[in-house]
Amino acid sequence: MGLWQLNPSSLRILIPRDTIAEKVRDMGHRLTTELLAEEDRLHRAGITPGPVVMVPVLTGAILFVADLVRAMPVTMSIKPVTVSSYPGAATSSQGATVQQGIPMDLKGKRIILVDDILDSGQTLGLLRRMIMAQNPQSLRLCVLLTKRDVKRVEEVPCEHSCFDIGNEFVVGYGLDYDGNYRNVPDIAVLTQPVQ
Ligand code: IMP
Ligand code: MG
């Protein structure tokens, strides 16, 4: 039923929606447990825990962060940043540019930077440096996907990743090709070459 029946042969499902939902819920719970443990540690050290701020990288992390935050019963704010690395129909990273300002009030806060995919590492590398320069109380990186076999332009430590995938170009659940397919509910590989 529905939209994707219009062109079913061009998308091959790699990770179905139910699997995504389960993994994202688990990730939300894991982050929550970590944040609570961190809070305990800080209290015991006589330090007041800073506010929790989710920083999703738009547009790709839009669906991921929406599901993730709903699995985190934690007081938090959400401050998105817009980065572009794939102008138009490019399928390999063109280097990251911040399109819309990174929040500048992150000092003393506990930040979770959320992106759709770790590929060359340029996006998360750049944002990580810009956030660290503000002296947050802590910073965690969380991605939906990690491209496992890619040679990174920048090594970025990212301990929170829902899925490892091979070196395929994927769309859906927020990920796009030339601005399209973000609303595909599953993570899929485009099987027909697109003009
Ligand atoms: P990096 O800076 O090369 O790590 O690229 C990360 C960004 O590139 C992600 O936030 C995505 O927007 C985009 N990207 C990388 N691989 C894919 C893919 O397979 N499909 C769609 N977008 C991708
Ligand atoms: Mg992106």
Image: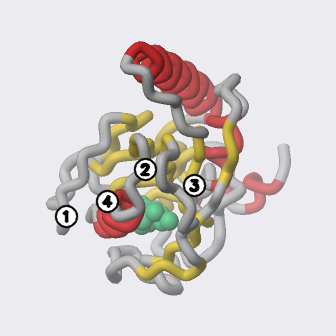
Task: Look at mark 2 in the image and give the residue it sits on.
Answer: 136
1 or 2: tag closer to the N-terminus? 2
| Whether the residue under disc 4 has CB within 8 Å of ligand 1 | yes
- Kindly check if marks 3 and 1 are in contact, taking CB atoms under 8 A apart as contact: no
The CA distance from mark 2 to mark 3 is: 16 Å
Task: Look at mark 4 in the image and give the residue it sits on.
Answer: 119
| Whether the residue under disc 2 has CB within 8 Å of ligand 1 | no
Amino acid type of the residue tagged 4 in the rendering: Asp
Task: Look at mark 1 in the image and give the residue it sits on.
Answer: 154
Task: Look at mark 3 in the image and give the residue it sits on.
Answer: 56
Element under disc 1: loop
Amino acid type of the residue tagged 2 in the rendering: Pro
* Residue occupying the point 56% across, 30% down: 24
**As rendered, which of 13 and 176 lies closer to the eye?**
176
Q: Residue furthest right?
A: 2
The CA distance from mark 2 to mark 4 is: 25 Å
The picture places residue 67, in percent across and down from the top left corner, at: 68, 37
Q: Which image quadrant is residue 86 in?
A: bottom left
Image height of 195 relative to 137, above or below: below
- Kindly check if marks 4 and 1 are in contact, taking CB atoms under 8 A apart as contact: no
The CA distance from mark 3 to mark 4 is: 16 Å
The picture places residue 59, in percent across and down from the top left corner, at: 61, 65
Would residue 68 appear left or right of 36 to someone viewing this image? right
Amino acid type of the residue tagged 1 in the rendering: Glu
* Residue occupying the point 30% across, 63% down: 125
The picture places residue 126, in percent across and down from the top left corner, at: 34, 69
